[in-house]
Amino acid sequence: MATIKFWGVRGSVAAPITADDVSQKVLTALQAFHASLKTGNLSPEKFLESLPFSVRGTIGGNTSCVEVRCGDERICLDMGTGMRPFGNSLFPQMFENGGLTVTVLLSHVHWDHIQGLPFFGPLHINKETGIKNRWNFYGGTDWMSTAEACLRGQMDAPEFPVSWQEIKRATHEINASSVCDMMGFHVGAVKVKTRKLHHPQETYGWRIEYDGKVIAYSTDNEPYDPSCPDPRLLELAEGADVWITDCQYTKEMYEGKVGGVARHGWGHSYPEAVAETARRAGVKKTVLFHHDPASDDNKVLEIVEMCKGLVGVGQEVVAAYEGMEIAL
Ligand SMILES: [Zn+2]
Ligand SMILES: [Zn+2]
């Protein structure tokens, strides 16, 4: 069985919920509670369940990090700030098993995809404690020639108090492998394939196949033409059970009709393009991801509704939110 857990779903920069946002949710909940007094007596738990997600929950503010479990294999898609809570979740198993193996598939090295690495707790466990952790990084060729510099850069003093060299010395095993377009390889019994995406700097999407199921991940991708999906993207998402995709903007935001400036060339997508790809690729469940930091919960859910209205019959569309889990 494969499972997916979302630890960070924002794009560009971390965007925590604000005090005003929380107050608005509480106010809406109280108004709903008052209205419910006239119709019935729900328990607090039932009442909470009856509220819409935009009131009882939140999309979350951490940047890209998704955990994929395929049997015993643990894969981490990107290392945004969501990698901090992901790391914290791993401690019990790490101590129980005497170590962990995590395969990191990195789309690219923009800040919102790497900033969680220094705060990934298990990274700081010294092998002298007897813990045998193994971290396997996969990423692009252009930057991989300077991979150490990319990873080290954000951890060198004065930016961070623990250097990458110290981490390397203290860790049981760290491996870094470079990938290129259309490359296929295995992580245990998991089949992985790459496709290059359309984004500033070298960026990859990942197709993960395991036990007859397909998970595709393509964040940070700009459509060339929304009515004519990129064949590379179609190949990546073809028949996917779950396609996790960039859908950062609305088309109006992309074209600069709202939000001040056009976002051409920024490397991100919008519902019209996402839906056309989902339709043509025959995706079962499309998960909108890499939400804009300026989009509040209602805006993200509005983008989901736009996308739902454009996909084919029977195709599901949901917004990724922190803590969301999918079992396949
Ligand atoms: Zn990004
Ligand atoms: Zn990027």
Image (cartoon, helix red, strand yellow):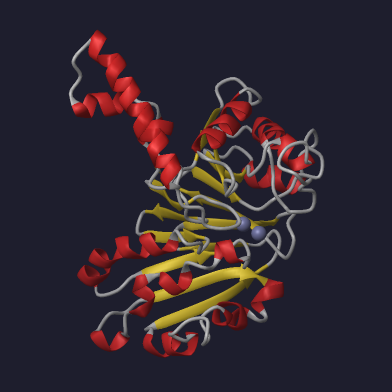
Query: Ligand 2 falls in which quarter?
Result: bottom right
Name the residue located 81 percent from the left edge and 40 percent from the top edge. Answer: 225
| 176 or 265, nearer to the observer | 265
**Relative image position of residue 299 (x, y in whole percent):** 56, 35
- Please tell me in which quadrant of the rendered image residue 46 appears: top left
* Relative to 259, residue 170 above or below: below
* Above/below status of 62 relative to 154: above
Residues 259 and 195: in front is 259
Q: Is residue 213 above or below residue 98?
A: above
Q: Nearer the viewer, residue 29 or 270?
A: 29
Q: Position of residue 265 (x, y in %)?
A: 79, 53
Query: Which residue lies most toward the top here?
Result: 39
Q: Position of residue 122 (x, y in %)?
A: 34, 73
Asked if one can make out residue 328 in the rendered structure from this viewpoint, the answer is: no
Q: Quadrant of residue 189?
A: bottom left
Residue 172 horizontal/vertical position (percent): 37, 84
Residue that appears at 49% across and 85% down: 164
Q: How many marks?
A: 0
Direction from residue 19 to residue 179 in the image, left or right: right
* Left or right: 98, with 236 as reference point: left
Location of the C terminus by quadrant is: top left
Observer able to see residue 203: yes
The residue located at (44%, 85%) in the rendering is 161
Judge left or right: residue 104 versus residue 248.
left
